[in-house]
Image: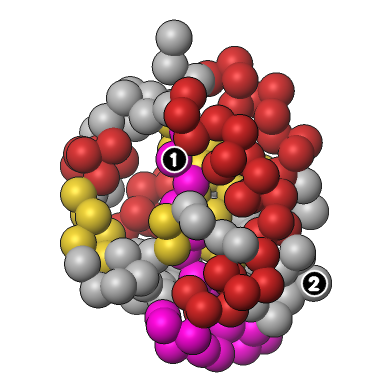
């Protein structure tokens, strides 16, 4: 992994267009692997609340759907977007479905896991693992799936751009 910063990477948005993470330089990123049929799925509401509260202060939330945990995200990118909008009013950026572990791990998650290993080493253990990335794109803090979005507010406020 030779990326110095997450801003060296790109990812595909839910609509198929490319997101150059460099375009988010100077923003605080909250990156979450999500799923529609998980016990933690109601966290979408909390993530949306954080988005509404902090997006104008420099927080960008990126939801990366993943179907690697008990087949809890079987839908297409379009179905996932519809589900999130209809059930949780999600307006933060959803990305295309990816892998977060294994040989097809998306480069964003390779970077995040290398910067912030968890209890299982570099593996993501379940849906709704959250990564808070500093505004310079180099420091990453990992939060467990059980951490409610509202419980991250102190960390978010401390790291928001001045």
Of badges 1 and 2, the one in the foreground is: 1
- Secondary structure at numbered mark 1: strand
Q: Quadrant of the C terminus?
A: top left
- Residue 40 lies, with reference to residue 160, above or below; the image says below
Q: Residue at x 69, y 29 (%)?
A: 153
- Residue 147 lies, with reference to residue 74, above or below; the image says above
Q: Is residue 72 magenta?
A: yes
Position of residue 71 measured from the top left corner of the image (x, y, whole percent): 62, 88
Q: Residue at x 31, y 25 (%)?
A: 26
Label 2 crowding class (10 Å Cα cut-off): few <14, some 14-19, many 20+? Answer: few
Residue 69 visible in the picture: no
Left or right: 13 in relation to 120: left
Q: CA distance from mark 1 to mark 2?
A: 24 Å
- Residue 144 lies, with reference to residue 23, above or below; the image says below
Mark toward the start of the polypeptide (1 vs 2): 2
Position of residue 94 measured from the top left corner of the image (x, y, whole percent): 43, 63
- Secondary structure at numbered mark 2: loop
Q: Residue at x 61, y 62 (%)?
A: 89
Position of residue 134 measured from the top left corner of the image (x, y, whole percent): 43, 27
Q: Is residue 21 magenta?
A: no
Q: Which mark is residue 135?
A: none
Q: Read off the residue under disc 2.
A: 39
Q: Read off the residue under disc 1.
A: 60
Residue 127 visible in the picture: yes
Q: Over which residues does the magenta segment extend? A: 59-79
- Residue 161 lies, with reference to residue 138, above or below; the image says above
């Amino acid at each position: 992994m030779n990326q110095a910063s997450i801003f060296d990477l790109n990812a595909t948005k839910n609509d198929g267009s490319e997101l150059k993470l460099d375009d988010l330089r100077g923003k605080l990123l909250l990156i979450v692997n999500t799923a529609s049929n998980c016990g933690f799925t109601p966290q979408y509401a909390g993530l949306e609340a954080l988005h509404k509260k902090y997006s104008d202060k420099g927080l960008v939330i990126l939801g990366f759907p993943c179907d690697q945990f008990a087949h809890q995200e079987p839908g297409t990118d379009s179905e996932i977007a519809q589900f999130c909008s209809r059930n949780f009013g999600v307006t933060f950026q959803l990305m295309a479905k990816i892998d977060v572990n294994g040989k097809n791990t998306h480069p964003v998650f390779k970077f995040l896991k290398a910067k912030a290993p968890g209890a299982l080493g570099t593996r993501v253990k379940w849906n709704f693992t959250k990564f808070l990335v500093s505004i310079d794109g180099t420091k990453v803090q990992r939060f467990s799936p059980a951490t409610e979005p509202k419980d991250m507010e102190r960390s978010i406020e401390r790291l928001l751009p001045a």
